[in-house]
Image: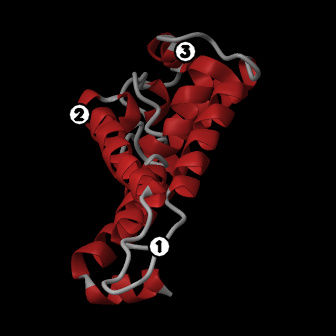
């Protein structure tokens, strides 16, 4: 329902979504190296790379080499392009550390969401930080990028520390109350 409202409210969003469907159809028919086609190709190759070493992965720093080995097809086609970034945080972790590493990543996000399960503005800010990071990780692997990774660390750290401090601080006594 939110997507339908957004499509109607934003002409740019509507055009971009419709253009993505055109790009997807072009990719499926011609292996075109367009934005949507490349993302689909990265996801397809990522799944195959993880399937080759599902439990413990290929090791840290292995993403560029694994994608280079998967590159095939005519020059300029989506299947011929080797990337250094799978554009998906879960796959980025699973390629290097396997399903066990991806499970730890998901457990980290779950623990962070649980940290912010209380009420109040600070808890909501923390929830927004974690949910935004999780949702955007479907199309980015930004936790491995310096700025975005540290922003998440500081955001969860500062807001999480504030939530924990507030949870341990006893409520102030009202004036005139007997101890």
Give the mark, 1 or 2, whose residue is nearer the N terminus.
1
Residue 126 rendering spot, x and y as whole percentages = 39, 58
Q: Which residue matches tag 3?
A: 66
> Vertical placement of 120 versus 154: above or below?
below
On the picture, is 36 further left or further right than 70?
Answer: left
Give the mark, 3 or 2, whose residue is nearer the N terminus.
3
For image coordinates 29% across by 73% down, the residue present is 13
Q: Which mark is residue 104?
A: none
Q: Quadrant of residue 146?
A: top left
Q: Residues within 10 Å of mark 1 (few under 14, many from 20)?
A: few
On the picture, is 48 further left or further right than 13?
Answer: right
For image coordinates 52% across by 45% down, the residue present is 40
Give the mark, 1 or 3, whose residue is nearer the N terminus.
3
Q: Which residue matches tag 2?
A: 147
The answer to whether residue 46 shows anywhere in this view is yes
Q: Residue furthest front?
A: 178
Q: Which residue matches tag 1?
A: 119
Residue 3 rendering spot, x and y as whole percentages = 44, 80
On the picture, is 144 further left or further right than 116?
Answer: left
């Amino acid at each position: 329902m939110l997507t339908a409202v957004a499509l109607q409210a934003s002409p740019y969003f509507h055009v971009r979504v419709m253009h993505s469907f055109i790009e997807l159809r072009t990719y499926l028919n011609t292996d075109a190296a367009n934005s949507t086609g490349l993302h689909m190709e990265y996801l397809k190759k990522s799944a195959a790379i993880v399937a080759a070493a599902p439990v413990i992965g290929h090791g840290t720093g292995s993403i560029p080499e694994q994608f280079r080995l998967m590159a095939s097809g005519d020059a300029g086609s989506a299947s011929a392009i080797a990337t250094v970034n799978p554009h998906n945080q879960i796959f980025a972790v699973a390629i290097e550390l396997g399903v066990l590493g991806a499970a730890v990543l998901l457990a980290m996000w779950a623990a962070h969401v649980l940290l912010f399960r209380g009420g109040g503005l600070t808890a909501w800010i923390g929830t927004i930080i974690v949910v935004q990071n999780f949702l955007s990780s479907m199309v980015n692997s930004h936790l491995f990028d310096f700025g975005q990774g540290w922003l998440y660390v500081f955001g969860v750290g500062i807001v999480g520390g504030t939530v924990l401090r507030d949870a341990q601080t006893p409520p102030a006594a009202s004036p005139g109350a007997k101890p």
